[in-house]
Image (spheres, rainbow, N blue to C red):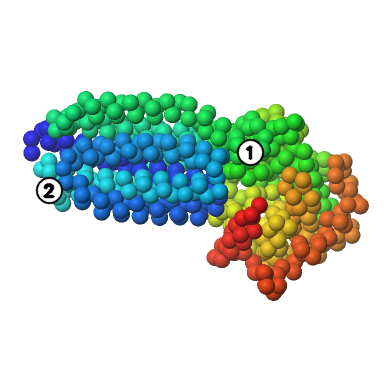
Amino acid sequence: MDQHKVTQSKTIYWASGIVSICGIIFEVLFGALGSYLLGDGVKQYTLTISLFLTGMGIGASLSEKVTKGLILSFIWIEILIGIIGGFSSFLMFGITAYLGSGSDALFLYLVTLTIGALTGIELPILIRKANEIGVTLQRSTARVLFSDYAGGLIGGLLFVLLLRPQFGMVKTAFLVAIVNILVAMWLLYMFRHEIKHLRKHAVLASVILAILVGGAIVGEEAALSFEQKLYRDPIIHSEQTTYQKIIVTKEQGDTRLYLDGSLQFSSSDEHRYHETLVHPTMSASNTDRDVLVLGGGDGLAVRELLKYDSVQRITLVDLDPRIVELARTNPHFTDLNHYALDDPRVKAISMDAFEFMEDTDKFYDVILVDLPDPNNESLNKLYTKEFYSLLRNRLQPGGAMMVQGTSPVFAREVYWTISKTIESTGLYVENFHVDIPSFGNWGFVMASREPINVNQLKVEVDTKFLSHDVLPALMQFGKDEGPNVVDKDGQRVELKPNTLIDPHLIEKYERAWRHY
């Protein structure tokens, strides 16, 4: 094989690896888009990966029809991937904002299938072109596949560690598309002697490249205007971290925090939530020197805890360090939490709550579980018998813990399943709920190693909402929100603990909130 053909074969292998990186990034990007905009991350990742692989199978079959002009065909496949993939995230936000009602899901699934099909055409064409150059079929297939699989690993790591947290989903799509176009233009140059009307193809590719570069520059800002329509109030802070999308809105003095589209608090009524989370628990514990808060990186629960002079240590465990940083530095947060996280008694740890509980050897007088709802697999593990058993094992005798448990009105079966799961660890439980205008009726589960004497619960610090007289009302549940859950036929539903092996709470949660 002459040197020219050696250079061309190496070009094919490098191109295979690069476009494979792009393909896997688009695949996981579509899963992330579905998870953020459509909810139920496990479902969306499962569907997008399945559709992408199905598309690749369709594309591999269609590649048989490409018999002439292999390189030019590959070049235009890359250009098509660049156009469709580049605008995918941008258009997804627009469709969600203006159409919604299933249109966004249909669009995402069609784009996933299409990009998958185009990706599936790539490899067979490259293998055949390498064989055409003079590389034996066995060697060309093995080398192209190696480049493809190795590129897949690199693409996945790039998306998780760099692209998603640093550039967000809209700009990432444009940047990856630009790489596809650059590969197409590189191949145009390397195989220029084989391609007719070279200048025409180069000009068209250059125009598309310029459009995608423009999209990378201004697309994020334009998509933010689409995203704004998903929220009631003006967005004042938007940030994609390694773990989640942070949105802060504000209108007429009401500041709201959203994580991955789910409301976390409204400044107008968050005190009702946090006072119910904290003060009954502090009253129920025999001592409150050492407190553990899981979640709650906004510092609002810590603000309530610092009203007690007896508290000596507060350990705050939140997965995302950016939430804690915002709570310490952003004036919209510090105005609410009163700089609580700067108190010397507070130690913030960025760590998964499950892993922290597995690793810690400390005992705590009070444990507050202020975690997001169990709407995906990673959060579900924090609502299992196994997790609550870890909490029980680290709770001091005479201590108390409180768990936010979603709504007994909107997600009645979910709330009482959480209560049942905590009780299954051998802890004694008491149930509370409170009306929070921005959320609706919200539930909490108090637990202790010993029976809880609710008649002795008191509120002994300054509060905006909670009082000693109000406490008994928080433990009264109506017929349509109490523990006797019935199905549509009026038959009582036997609730069972949620476990790592049987994570049925996710399905219950999705079913309960589908229409809210």
Distance CA(mark 2)–CA(mark 1): 57 Å
**Place of residue 30 in the rendered image (x, y in percent of width and height, measured from the top left):** 45, 45
Residue 407 percent coordinates (x, y): 71, 55
Residue hosting label 2: 136
Q: Residue 191's image quarter?
A: top left
The image's mark for residue 25 is none
| Residue shown at 56% from the left, 66% from the top | 502
Q: Is residue 339 visible?
A: no
| Total number of numbered discs in the rendering | 2
Q: Name the kind of residue labelled 1 in the image.
A: Tyr
- Residue that label 1 marks: 231
Q: Which residue is at a point 45% across and 54% down the rendered structure image?
A: 47
Quarter occupied by the N terminus: top left
Q: Which residue in the rendered view is the most extreme toward the front? A: 99
Residue 485 or residue 145, whichever sits in front: 485
Up/down of 306 relative to 56, above or below: above
Q: Which is more toward the observer, 349 or 423?
A: 423
